[in-house]
Every structure is written in C-alpha cells, then in structure tokens.
Amino acid sequence: MLSPLSAPVVTTFVALAAAMLALWAPRVWFSPHARSLWVLPFAVALLAAQMAEVVTTPGLVAMFVLITATRVGYQVPDGGLRGFALALMLALSGGLLLHAVPGFDNPRLLDGVRLSADAEPYTKFLNFDKGVLGLFLLGLFAPERALRRAPRGATPAVTWRLAIIAIVVMGLTVAAGYARWDPKLPVWWPAWLASMIFFTALPEEAVFRHVIQGGLQTWLGPTQQSRWTALAGGAALFGLAHVGGGWVYVALATVAGLGYGLVYAITGSIVAAILAHTALNTLHLLFFTYPALAR
C-alpha cells in the first residue's frame, strides 16, 4: 500500500513535477521568456520541501553549488575554470543520484511492499535530490539541446528497436535468475508511474544521456565513431551507477543503458529517452517479478 504523505510533501512533489513539465514551455509558446517559467513552480516546491523537512540547510547549499557549477560549466569558455566547474557538476550529480549528498530526506512512497510471494520487499522513495538534479541539468545545462524534438518519422524506428531492447533486457534478466514471468496490476501503479517518470527516469536520463552522451558527442565531433563512443560511454557509466546491485546487475543496466542511448542517438530527444526508460521499467513491473526474486 501507499505510504501516507502529508500535504506539504504532496505539494513538494507535484510542484517539482510541474517545474519539470515547464522546462518544455518554449515549445508551446515559442517565446524565449518561457524558458524561465520552471522557476516559479520550483520555488513553490522548494518552499514546501522546507516546510516538510524534505530538504535542510546542507541540501540548500548543495543545490546552490550545483546551480553555480552548471551555469559556469555551460557558459564559460574552455579553460581551467570551466573544467573545474564541469568536474564539480559531475561529482555532485553522482552524489545526488546515489543519495550520498546530505541535506535531503526523501519520503517513502511504498514501504516494504511484496508484490509476489517470491519477490524481494520493495521500497520506493520520492527522490527530491534526484528530481532537482534532473531539473537543473535540463534547465541550465545546454537547455536548447533538452528542447530538441525527435525528427518526423522517427517513431516506427524507435518503436521496433525499443521492442528488441525490452526482449533482450528482460530475457537476460530472467536468464540471470533475477526475475520470472509474473503479470500483475498493483492498485498503486499510477502513483508509481508518475514517480518513475519524474523522479527516476528523468534525472537519470538527464545525467547519462543529456549531459554525458550528448556532451561527449558534442566534444568528439559529428562523426559516426564519436556517436557510438558517446553512446557506449553513457551506457557504461549508467551500468556502473547500479553497482550496489552486484556486477550481474551492472551488466543488465549497461545493456538497458545501450538501449536508452540508442533511442537518444536516433532521435536527439531527451523526452524519447525518458519515455523509453519508463516503458522498460513499467514492463518489468507489470509482467515480471519486481523488483527481483528474493535471494
């Protein structure tokens, strides 16, 4: 069952999700002024987060440092200062993804739920730290790249590739003994899906596809070899970010990361990568043991 959430906590995450959606406001209004619209709902989210004690002073300091490093890393010309800012941005990104930065108390959405008799207990948090990371990286670091649309006619090419990716990843997951066929429809799946999109898939794709894969592609140049190098680099780091689950899990995450990276390489759209990530995780939840077979 869903954990009870206070009104300030609900306000925090609804406003943070609204800020993320507002990142794409320029697509709707075709106005440069729309680029700043996400700041208002984020201010509401931040105020509510402080009321709910989801974020405390160390977290506020970390967010300020991240904003500064992100803007300097994007706007300052190449040189020592820019290199330091990018290194600091990436270090903070890693810390926030792994929940290692102090000052954040992410509330539980689900606590110790067992979806099947042979499944591990499942706890899911509403990740404010990861959420603000995704928001800042997409809103402040190469925001014009975050707004890119997928080219016309890309949907069929992405769809069949995503189907193959899903078959390969879930087939390997079953073969590795992490899951079995187990169709189900938990009553709380809509809340889980919203959390997955905004507070898991979006920040992870912002780091590994928008910043790392997209940044490597820009740095290495517009060649086919650099495109594949950037894709592989983002996927490898995505896999290593899951090292807490063991090396087999790292391998599975790397294969999944190659799939998300391929979608991003084909479309140039971070939205497409976020949706691909969400689709695969949703397939896992609805049709296979989730999060994994108990060991």
Image: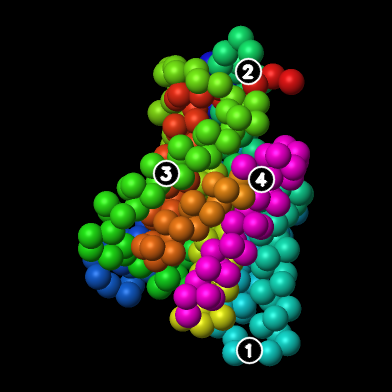
- Identify the residue under disc 1: 78
Tell which circle, 4 or 3, labels the residue nearer the N-terminal end: 3
Mark 3 = which residue? 164
Q: Choose between 249 and 131: the one closer to the eye.
A: 249
Please say whether residue 224 is one of the residues in the magenta stretch: yes
Up/down of 153 relative to 167, above or below: below
Question: What secondary structure is marked by label 3?
Answer: helix
The residue type indicated by label 1 comes to Asp
Can you say whether 225 is above or below 189 in the image?
below
Please determine whether, in this image, residue 49 is positioned above or below residue 174. below
Which residue lies under the disc numbered 4? Answer: 251
Instruction: Report the mark closest to the observer, 1 or 2.
Output: 2
Residue type (three-letter) at the residue carrying disc 4: Ala
User: x, y percentage for residue 9?
Assistant: 55, 35
Local packing at callout 4 (Cα closer than 10 Å; few below 14, some 14-19, many 20+) is many
Which region of the structure is painted magenta? 223-252
Label 4, label 3: how far apart the Cα atoms are: 17 Å
Can you say which quadrant of the picture contains the C terminus?
top right
Q: Does residue 268 appear anywhere in the picture?
A: yes
Residue 28, position as x, y percentages in the image: 25, 62
Q: Is residue 87 magenta?
A: no
Q: Residues within 10 Å of mark 1 (few under 14, many from 20)?
A: few
Residue 14 seen: no
